[in-house]
Image (cartoon, rainbow, N blue to C red):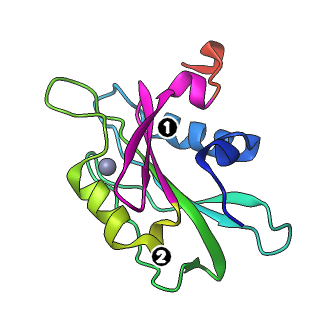
Amino acid sequence: MDFSAEHLLNDIAIRTAMREALRESQPGTKHPTEQGGFIVRDATTLRPVVRRLSVGQADSFQIPLCPDGRFHAEQIIGSFHTHPNIGPEWQEEPSRQDIRLVTEYPETVGAIHFVIGPAQTYSITTDGTVCVLGKTDDVLQIDPEDKS
Ligand SMILES: [Zn+2]
């Protein structure tokens, strides 16, 4: 079964995990860190769930290669990382390395990779297509009250 971006983002557990990742990235602070994880199929419920990966650097995020399409035995559906850096010297949209990761390692990233910035959320699909999914506040349904 394939999961579309829309299908995955309609899942409250996934949106919540992505929101947490973005918040923990501390965008706009002095010490932002990229965060991310895999969206896998839970072995028991078969529902898509997020498995977070260890914290990245201020401006990069490492995804472990999973050539068999599994992370700890769970099937990888998709993946994501955050781009918390904002300012004139940063681009929020997916970097060339991000796109290369997705096109060269489709087994690792799954069918879709999300890049979540404080302003906008993007998707990269395995043919290298980048889409703007919309404002992150809308895509992840962030309540203005829990932004603090
Ligand atoms: Zn990136």
Task: Please tell me whether mark 1 sits on a helix, a strand or a loop.
Answer: helix
Q: Which residues are magenta?
A: 112-140
The one nearer the camera, 41 or 88, is 41
- Residue at 38 percent of width and 30 percent of height: 27
* Quadrant in which residue 16 is drawn: top right
First in residue order: circle 1 vs circle 2: 1
Q: Secondary structure at mark 2?
A: helix
Residue ID for mark 2: 107
Q: Is residue 88 above or below residue 18?
A: above
Residue type indicated by callout 2: Glu
Q: Percent x, y for residue 102?
A: 37, 63
Q: Amino acid at mark 1?
A: Leu
Tell me which residue sits at (37%, 50%) in the image. 129
Compared across the picture, whether 31 is left or right of 113 comes to left
Residue at figure coordinates x 16%, y 23% from the top left = 88
Determine which of the numbered discs, if any, sits on residue 22 in the image.
1
> What is the crowding at mark 1: few (fewer than 14 residues within 10 Å), some, or many (at least 20)?
many
Residue 41 falls left or right of residue 25: right
Determine the residue positioned at 31% across, 44% down. Answer: 94
- Indicate whether residue 144 is drawn in magenta: no
Disc number for residue 103: none
In percent of width and height, residue 74 lies at 66, 76
In this rendering, the answer to whether 4 lies above or below 76 is above
Q: Residue furthest left?
A: 89
